[in-house]
Image: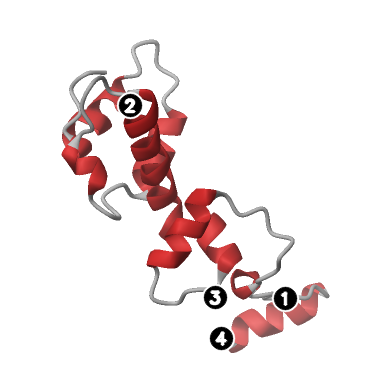
C-alpha cells in the first residue's frame, strides 16, 4: 500500500523480495527425498529451493523420510502404517508441533502420530 511505501521511505530502509524459491542450481544438496518429491510434482525440475524449504513441501519431505524409515528400518515395527503412504497427509504445521514438543512424555508427538497417521506403536 501507499502508506507502507511512505513509511519505508521515511525510515530509509529497502525491502527486497528475492523470490529465491525458483532458484535451481546443481549446487543444491538434493537428497533422494527431494529428488523423489520433484519427480512427483507437476513442475518437475523447477522451484528446487522452494521444494526443499517451504512450508508447502516440508511436511511431505518428512512423510517420505518416515516412510523410508518404516520400510527399511522397521521404525514402527513389522508393518508400515498405511496412512504413511498417503501423499501430503503430514502438514508442516504438524511437523513443527512435533518438533516443538519438549514435554517429558512427548504427548504432542504421540497424539499427532495416533490421530493423523493412525500409528499406535509409539
Q: In this view, does 56 lie above or below 64?
A: below
Q: Earlier in the sequence, mark 2 or mark 1?
A: 1
Q: Which of marks 4 and 1 is nearer the N terminus?
A: 4
Label 4 – label 1 distance at C-alpha = 15 Å
Given the current orientation, which residue lies at the most extreme front position? 72
Question: What percent of the width, then of the height, locates residue 47?
Answer: 55, 72
The residue that disc 3 covers is 46
Q: Is residue 39 above or below residue 76?
A: below
Label 1 – label 3 distance at C-alpha = 22 Å
The residue that disc 1 covers is 16
Please, what secondary structure does the residue beneath circle 2 have?
helix
Q: Which of marks 3 and 4 is nearer the N terminus?
A: 4
Question: What percent of the width, then of the height, locates residue 58?
Answer: 45, 51
The crowding category of the residue bearing disc 1, from other C-alpha atoms within 10 Å (few below 14, some 14 to 19, many at least 20), is few
Q: Earlier in the sequence, mark 4 or mark 2?
A: 4
Q: Is residue 74 above or below residue 57?
A: above
Question: Between tags 3 and 4, which lies in front?
Answer: 3
Residue 99 at least partly seen: yes
Question: Between tags 2 and 1, which lies in front?
Answer: 2
Question: What percent of the width, then of the height, locates residue 44?
Answer: 47, 74
The residue that disc 4 covers is 1
Label 4 – label 2 distance at C-alpha = 41 Å
Question: Between tags 4 and 2, which lies in front?
Answer: 2
The crowding category of the residue bearing disc 3, from other C-alpha atoms within 10 Å (few below 14, some 14 to 19, many at least 20), is some
Give the residue at x 72% y 74%.
15
Label 2 – label 3 distance at C-alpha = 33 Å
Amino acid at each position: 500500500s501507499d502508506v507502507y511505501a511512505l513509511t519505508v521511505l521515511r525510515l530509509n530502509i529497502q525491502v527486497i523480495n528475492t523470490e529465491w524459491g525458483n532458484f535451481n542450481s546443481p549446487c543444491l544438496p538434493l537428497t533422494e527425498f527431494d529428488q523423489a518429491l520433484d519427480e512427483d510434482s507437476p513442475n518437475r525440475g523447477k522451484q528446487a529451493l522452494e521444494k526443499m524449504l517451504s512450508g508447502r513441501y516440508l511436511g511431505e519431505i518428512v512423510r517420505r523420510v518416515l516412510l523410508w524409515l518404516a520400510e527399511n528400518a522397521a521404525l514402527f515395527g513389522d508393518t508400515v502404517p498405511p496412512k504413511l503412504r498417503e501423499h501430503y497427509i503430514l502438514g508442516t504445521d504438524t511437523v513443527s508441533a512435533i518438533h516443538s514438543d519438549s514435554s517429558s512424555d512427548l504427548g504432542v508427538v504421540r497424539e499427532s502420530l495416533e490421530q493423523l497417521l493412525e500409528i499406535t506403536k509409539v
